[in-house]
Amino acid sequence: MGFLAGLAEERVDHRFKGLPPDADGLTVGELAAQRRNLFTDGFTTPVLALSAERLEHNLALMETYATRHGLAFAPHGKTTMAPELFARQLDHGAWGITLAVPHQVRVARAFGIRRIFLANELVDAAALKWIAAELARDAEFQLICYVDSVRGVELMDAALAGAARPVDVVVELGAGEGARTGARTEAECTAVADAVAATRTLRLVGVAGYEAEVPGATPERVAAWLRRLTALASEFDKAGRFSGTGLDEIVVSAGGSAWFDAVADTFAEIPELSLPVLKLLRSGAYVSHDDGQYRRVTPFNRIPEEGALHPAFRLWAQVVSRPSPDQAFVNAGKRDAAYDLDLPEAQVVRGARDGVERPATGIEVTALSDQHAWLRTSPDVHLEVGDWVGLGLSHPCTSFDKWPLIPLVEADGTVTDYVRTYF
């Protein structure tokens, strides 16, 4: 994508954590061309590394999975907010990119993304007017947005008055009482659809929701909710809600990173409707996967015959204090590591004296301060000031958003590129 060319022209300076100080003034492209080594060529700690090989594996695996199950794929871009990764996802067959808020849409549009699924009800008048202008400016731009309330439809309609093109919307079915957003009942969904039909500014194109919000989620409960979602699409179709609007297909969308196998199974059972069905999966955390939450909940644990995602992030920090035989401190903390779901996991130690890596056996992260991780060590652990400790992280979303420029690193430590994020 030509829109990405400018990323390589950005200058390296103090804004970007972990990069070599002597690279200041180089462009990102010039620094990448030097193919520096993460450990020996001037990078400072803490520094977050994204594995080039594991990233490519994960991209290819989910492309294969979606294709095998007849799913279109709009991975959730709020995970990375990285246009370079959006482009690679599209290169791996993605239909488009899912986003959550107007700022994210603006980032995606700045980098030429043509298909966006906005998994939220958008009632901000200024943002809606901007989207209307984008739709008028670019005939190839397609945006699909949630609606989950009659009041939301009223606000959207008022903000979009006079728009050249209607905004395509899907009715969001809530996952249950006490869950997050979405109309709670089919009757409420019908009322929202009626409100959409009464406007000229919105066009109903399907139904959607988020199965991970099902209260007390189990395979049976998630499948039952997904069947409600697909039945809602069928009922809307029987009622003629998709006819006479110029639609080419009906959108049915769900799918986070914990239950996409259930989505695939249930969507495979959607009966024939009056138009082809775009079965749109929206999982996003797969790009980097992780060493915590998503390692535990990934559907590939249930379907190992379909493959396995690989954790692609490692945060490298340096031992800066060893005050006692059972305690050490490294120079990465809450400002650097995701900690909203789990603490980082000590995985490997790289000796400062010899550069040799060894498993971080007997080392545990017990707490984080702003700029320190607290390590508890077994009595027989050899760990000294200056050693590098590689940490596995939990929750990709809050890992990406702490690092505006992330080295893409091959297995031997060679940095081949840099991933720019926009949060």
Image: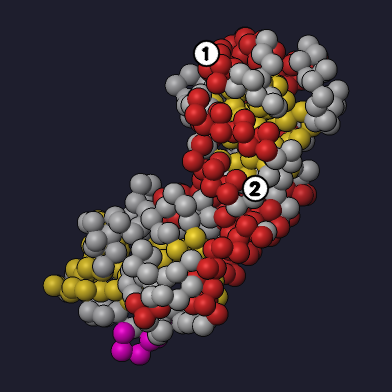
Residue highlighted by disc 1: 151
Residue 75 x/y as whole percent:
62, 46
| Magenta range | 352-359
Residue 286 x/y as whole percent:
57, 53
The way the protein has been coloured in the rendering is: secondary structure
Residue highlighted by disc 2: 113
Q: Quadrant of residue 39?
A: bottom left
Residue 342 x/y as whole percent:
36, 51
Q: For the residue carrying disc 1, how many other residues have a C-alpha within 10 Å: few (<14), some (14-19), or many (20+)?
A: few
Mark 2 near mark 1, Cβ–Cβ under 8 Å?
no
Q: Quadrant of residue 47?
A: bottom left
Determine the secondary structure under disc 1. helix
Q: Which amino acid lies under the numbered mark 2 shown in the image of this protein?
A: Ile
Q: Quick one: label 2 or label 1, which is nearer the N terminus?
A: 2
User: Is 26 situated above or below 158?
Assistant: below
Question: Which residue occupies 77% across, 49% down?
Answer: 67
Q: Does any portion of residue 124 appear in the rendered image? A: yes
